[in-house]
Image: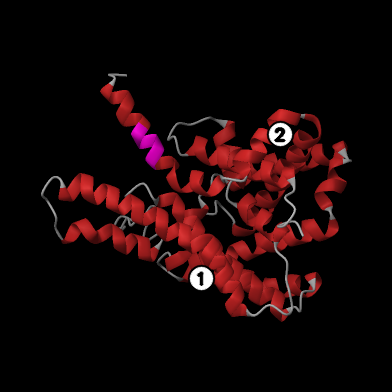
């Protein structure tokens, strides 16, 4: 199993994904890197999760939920509680300004969404204001996993059947996106959509597509051209607030194509860049704390630089 025996290029792909997250979240624009990186830096994590997903017919839903809760929800609540207590102490308790407002971030942690309405809504409510916005991904991934498990269960583990069933899941994602005025808690709307990425990852691993594509440089160049053109057509995206660019379907294609290119690059790094590949692999194995704490670390660095007058 992939989970048991770690595959280096999968970890490298995770590292490349998290590096784009780190760049984008500096708030600076890195031109094409920010734009094209923004196309795959969320899908790739769902796709990689699909690649390492194993459907076991004997496994009960309850034990699967428990396993994923331990992996995703325990860190989610742990890191969020740390951030809440830090800012509660710093901004409220030590300043002697404790009010009902001081506990509002707890609602954000429970709702686990950056805001209540899509980003451009004038009357928006912003939930995740304690540098915890990136952690939406953990609850979103948790819900996606559960939905994906149910699809695989209904398909009795058969990939082709799962693809047919997923049309219904994707249709419901589109309907919820256009008919529901609010962003749902725990990214349920987004999770319905992300099941397609998980399924794509499952197909990649079953058909060994990354390894086969790696041996065809011409096909890789063609894929890169398609990715660039479709990304440009779709425009920038932000999956965390259900902004899929001009088209949800186009973004699916773009997200899958971009992720596939990154995986081929990761396989190249594993084969030809010994130490660099291993260093990326190390980062890839520790993406969870990096995802949850990087904004906090950025703010500490910013504070330190200000104190030094830089």
Apparent side of residue 298 relative to residue 16 in the rendered image (left or right): left
Q: Could you give the CA–CA distance between mark 2 and mark 1, rounded to whole angstroms?
A: 41 Å
Residue 274 image point, x, y percent = 76, 30
Apparent side of residue 284 relative to residue 207 in the rendered image (left or right): left
* Picture quadrant where residue 276 is located: top right
Tell me if label 2 and label 1 are in contact, CB under 8 Å.
no
When the figure is inspected, residue 155 is found, relative to residue 183, above or below; the finding is below
In the picture, the disc for residue 277 is 2
Question: Magenta span has 306?
Answer: no
Judging by the rendered image, the residue that carries numbered circle 1 is 176
Apparent side of residue 32 relative to residue 178 in the rendered image (left or right): right
Q: Secondary structure at mark 2?
A: helix
Name the residue at the top extreme: 309
Question: Which residue appears at 26% of the width and 48% of the height?
Answer: 87
Q: For this rendering, which residue is in front, 55 or 230?
A: 55
Q: How many marks?
A: 2
């Amino acid at each position: 199993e992939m989970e048991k025996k770690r595959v280096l290029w999968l970890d490298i792909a995770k590292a490349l994904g998290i590096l784009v997250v780190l760049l984008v979240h500096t708030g600076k624009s890195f031109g094409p890197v920010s734009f094209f990186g923004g196309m795959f830096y969320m899908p790739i994590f769902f796709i990689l999760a699909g690649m390492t997903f194993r459907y076991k017919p004997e496994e009960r839903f309850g034990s699967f939920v428990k396993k994923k809760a331990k992996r995703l929800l325990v860190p989610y609540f742990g890191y969020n509680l740390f951030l809440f207590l830090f800012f509660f102490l710093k901004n409220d308790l030590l300043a002697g300004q404790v009010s009902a407002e001081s506990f509002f971030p707890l609602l954000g942690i429970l709702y686990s969404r950056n805001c209540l309405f899509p980003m451009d809504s004038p009357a928006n409510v912003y939930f995740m204001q304690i540098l915890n916005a990136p952690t939406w991904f953990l609850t979103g991934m948790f819900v996606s996993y559960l939905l994906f498990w149910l699809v695989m269960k209904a398909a009795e583990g058969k990939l082709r059947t799962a693809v047919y069933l997923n049309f219904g899941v994707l249709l419901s994602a589109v309907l919820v996106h256009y008919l529901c005025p609010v962003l749902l808690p725990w990214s349920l709307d987004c999770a319905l959509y992300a099941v397609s990425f998980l399924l794509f990852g499952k197909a990649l691993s079953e058909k060994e597509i990354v390894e086969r594509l790696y041996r065809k440089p011409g096909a890789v160049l063609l894929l890169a051209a398609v990715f660039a053109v479709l990304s440009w057509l779709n425009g920038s995206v932000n999956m965390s607030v259900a902004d899929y660019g001009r088209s949800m379907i186009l973004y699916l294609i773009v997200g899958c194509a971009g992720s596939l290119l990154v995986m081929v690059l990761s396989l190249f790094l594993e084969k030809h860049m010994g130490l660099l590949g291993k260093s990326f692999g190390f980062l890839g194995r520790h993406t969870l704390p990096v995802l949850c704490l990087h904004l906090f670390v950025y703010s500490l660095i910013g504070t330190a630089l200000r104190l030094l007058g830089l």
